[in-house]
Image (tube, grey):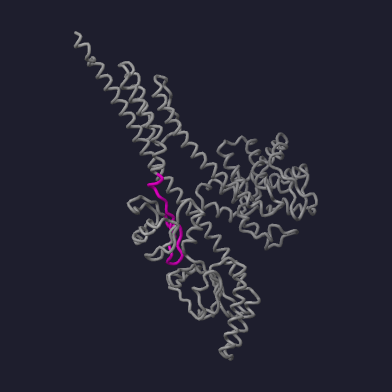
Amino acid sequence: MSAHARVPPRLLVRTLVASSLTTLVVLGAVFVAITLDTRQRVTTLVSANLAASQRAFVAFERRRVREASLQAAMLADSPTLKAALDTYQAESRIAGSSTQAELLRTVQIEVEKLAARFDVDALVVTDPGGRLLASAGQRSADWPAGDVIRVDPEDAGEEAVVRRGRTAYRVFDVPIALGEDVVADLHVATALDDRHAAELAELSNAQVAIVIGSRVVGASLPSDVREAIAAGTDTLPADGEVTLNRKPYAVRRVFTVGSARFYAVDSIGAARSSATRRAFLPLAWIACGALVLAVAGSLWLAQSVARPIDALSHRLDRMAAAQRFDQPLPVSGTSREVDTLARTANALMKSLAKAESATQEAYVGAIKALAAALDARDRYTAGHSARVSAFSVMAGRALNLPDEDIEVLRLGALLHDIGKIGISDRVLTKAGPLTKEEYDLVKQHPIVGAHILKQVPHLAPHIPVVELHHERPDGRGYPYGLQNDATPLLARIVHVADAFDAMTSARSYRSAQPVQSAIAELWRHAGTQFDARIVEAFVGAFSASGAAVLHEAWREPDAHAPAPSLLRAVGGGLA
């Protein structure tokens, strides 16, 4: 009997083994689910980052081309440069070689003066035949006088790619005219090299490679990755995953200039490894504790632990399969280890929810930044978008709109004047009545704003507010002349809020109206210029909570601004 007493009961051994195996299975399921989910989410996140990088690049390129055009036009309009070129064109045909050299020296001096005022790689002047007359800038050595600029047909366009030695340049050119005659061409050249790639990389959360043919001319990547890209350039996808140095990378072609292709590159492997390490460390500790408890526990302990773990694993599997992580795992209270596992999984899911919330906050912050950037163009309209948003939300709540519509209303009102980015400051801040042509230009800002928002899919719900907030019930609004309910409700609300803030805020051409006068104007035009039901809700809500809204959103107007033009403030559209 004593010999048999030293041998553990078979049932207990089998129970402990079953408990251990159950724990291992559950932990394995959790590890696999989290591993697969982490890899998928990291891959999706890297792709989303590259898509955001592409949008940033496209926006930067549009701004850069616009700035380059303005810069080149300003440089080409230099009177001293035109005078030097005029003298050269007039006298070079009859002058000797020494005189021609002196005339070219005069052109060179003027080009150097212009280059000193602007940060450009090279500023080049050519005659109508493409022969280099003068050059200046940090890379002027690549543009010696006397050479002829030749552009391959595939590199021609609004912006050309010109190859000078081993360096390729992005070249924006503009003709230099005297009267109706073009006497020369001015070229603003930017080198496509590592420095340019690094500047582009700073605009996004991704590395950049610039490829021409089979050669990587510029990159912000390590040398081994750069060489791998060069080796596989012919098969580099416009959007997808590639293997470089036996490691996965996400690649996206962000834009093309002639034969130059610009790619955003991000390492999927590094992101996966980092995310996996962060996810597995707490789970590893939980696994060790669960295994020790399973081996040391009794049949009752094994059973009490196995059952909740089994339920937990099934729930995790269902959550992973459905990609739904918004419901926290319940804490059963049957064992510390199981509860720790559930809390850790909840913490991981909560971290994921926080990350998604941070993305949403960044999206809202970007909208607010756009509105603030627009308002900052004119000190008289500073805070206008924020106040219109606050007034619109106040009226929307008075109309008992659902929370989803309130949020669309809030952000749409913030962006309602975003189209004025395309209108010059000379028109927006003009102190006095606008001409018909200027007013027609201002009336285009809803269409321009809608076009801007259409480039960003997340902003689609706000497009009707931006595009139609100047329509009127009587059909005399713009841009389409819609009548009554043909204009969406949210746009009609913003129209009333915009008019109220415009009347009660000072502008460069008038002073602010008293609040009661502005309310009287809303009632006077209810049913024609404004929706009567919205005016009633707005005035009622303002009487109840308008002071609080003003306290939060109002900026003091300039008491010394000129007298207002009432027609301009509340007419067919508000500037």
Query: Is 375 placed above or below 77 here?
Result: above
Q: Residue furthest top?
A: 1
Q: Quadrant of residue 533?
A: top right
Main structural element of the magenta stretch: helix, strand or loop?
A: strand
Residue stretch rendered in magenta on the structure: 252-271
Is 259 within the magenta? Answer: yes
Q: Quadrant of residue 408?
A: top right
Q: Residue at x 34, y 61 (%)?
A: 231
Q: Quadrant of the C terminus?
A: bottom right
Describe residue 392's horizontal placement relative to residue 305 as left or right: right
Could you tell me residue 425's position as x and y percent? 67, 59
- In this view, the residue in front, 261 or 439, is 261
Could you tell me residue 277's position as x and y percent? 39, 39
Q: Quadrant of the N terminus?
A: top left
- In this view, the residue in front, 247 or 46, is 247
Q: Residue at x 48, y 79 (%)?
A: 148
Could you tell me residue 376's position as x and y percent? 66, 52
- In this view, the residue in front, 182 or 344, is 344
Describe residue 1's horizontal placement relative to residue 74 as left or right: left
Is 548 within the magenta? Answer: no
- In this view, the residue in front, 94 or 460, is 94
Q: Residue at x 54, y 44 (%)?
A: 362
Describe residue 247's horizontal placement relative to residue 385 as left or right: left
Q: Quadrant of residue 461?
A: top right
